[in-house]
Image: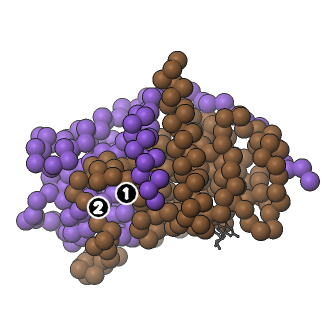
Chain colours: A brown, B purple
Amino acid sequence: MDFNGSDTIPGPRTEDHLPHTAETAVKIVIVGGFGVGKTTMVGSVSDIRPLTTEETMTQAGIGVDDNYGSESKTATTVAMDFGRISITEKLVLYLFGTPGQERFWFLWNGLFEGALGAVVLVDTRRLEVSFDVMGRLEERGVPFVVAINSFPDAPRYPVEELRTALDLTPEIPIMDCDVRRRASSKDVLMTLMRFLHSIALSRALV
Amino acid sequence: MTPPRRKRREPKPPPPPQPQPQPPAPEPADGEAEPKNPERLYTVAGSEDGARAELDLVTLIVARDAPQMAASPEQAAVLRLCANPLSVAELSAYLNLPFSAMTVLITELITAELVQVRAPIVRRALPDRSLLEAVMHGLQRL
Ligand SMILES: Nc1nc2c(ncn2[C@@H]2O[C@H](COP(=O)(O)OP(=O)(O)O)[C@@H](O)[C@H]2O)c(=O)[nH]1
Ligand SMILES: [Mg+2]
């Protein structure tokens, strides 16, 4: 991009500025297949218009091409939408909507390692798309909740049938949502936070 | 109609520890009493494609007090954007730069002492319950 015209580089609107007191940030990751509603969910709860960060990946999937301006035949661009919620004057929560394929995850340092937890968004028309994501989160020890984004023509299963099909332990919350609605997306995030809190409590007791 | 079935996986043992710089403690909120060069701790995991600070997507970057001498138009653009705290992810988005390129640019600014870094809170073995409660309270007000 042309930085000489940097006076014209768009930045946050004045009302989107974080206060100088903002000192810490936490993040939650929203994972799921293409079209499941990740970006919609980020947008419905974010204080700011959702933004996009990109990364470039070589076909081999090793190393990251820093010569982003130069020719690179094998480069693939992976995009991740995100939003922001100011929690207090000091604390900011970021939400990242992340592609389901794990080979993209390493492109962003500590995307999951540094996250409080994850929301796995599921479309019951394509349940199996979420299987690998859940397995990867389990392997990494990232706590997650499962949110079924209710598309009108999607099959509806009783929660216990889904729990069996997804092989989820009884404590992992499974809920329906409509991520186009702010209140519904907020419910999903609150459910994740309560789940994380219960994990923290139970660990404190042992 | 029965849904397809998955098989649960077990946690994997974490990969062998890599030498990771300790993130500095967050700076005091009043911004006045400034620890001496906290960014020094942010040095730089050697990698083939050059030195780069361990920056998270949600590491907050703040320009130090004006006036500042930016070495390049790119640097000037970053400094202008982070007059108020801004995450690495937001800088990457506004400047339309890949995340890795963004971290290289920010590493230069850290080295030149033109910006301050406010470390993110990462998930720990024992999560901080008061932090979780603060997030819950904040979300409840949405
Ligand atoms: N009916 C319905 N449509 C949705 C819902 N959530 C998202 N959509 C639509 O599904 C499409 C894909 O959503 P998007 O957020 O872009 O998916 P992403 O690829 O996971 O980021 C968009 O056209 C949304 O408007 C939902 O809860 N119900
Ligand atoms: Mg999307």
In this rendering, the answer to whether B42 lies above or below A4 is above
Front one among A72 and B115? B115
In this rendering, the answer to whether A124 lies above or below B73 is above
Q: Which quarter of the figure is the N terminus of chain A placed in?
A: bottom left
Front one among A156 and B47? A156
Q: Secondary structure at mark 2?
A: loop
Front one among B74 and A51? A51
Q: Residue at the spot x=56%, y=45% of the render?
A: A192
Question: Is disc 2 surrounded by few (<14), some (14 to 19) or many (20+) residues within 10 Å?
Answer: many
Q: Residue at the spot x=61%, y=68% of the render?
A: A180
| Quadrant of the image occupied by residue B74 | bottom left
Q: Earlier in the sequence, mark 1 or mark 2?
A: 2
Q: Secondary structure at mark 1?
A: strand
Residue A103 is situated, as x and y percent measured from the top left of the image, at: 58, 50
| Direction from residue B141 to residue A149 in the image, left or right | right
Chain label for disc 1: A
| Direction from residue B16 to residue A69 in the image, left or right | left
Q: Which residue is mark 2?
A: A18
The amino acid type, in three-letter code, at marker 1 is Ser
The amino acid type, in three-letter code, at marker 2 is Leu
What numbered label is drawn on residue A86? Answer: 1
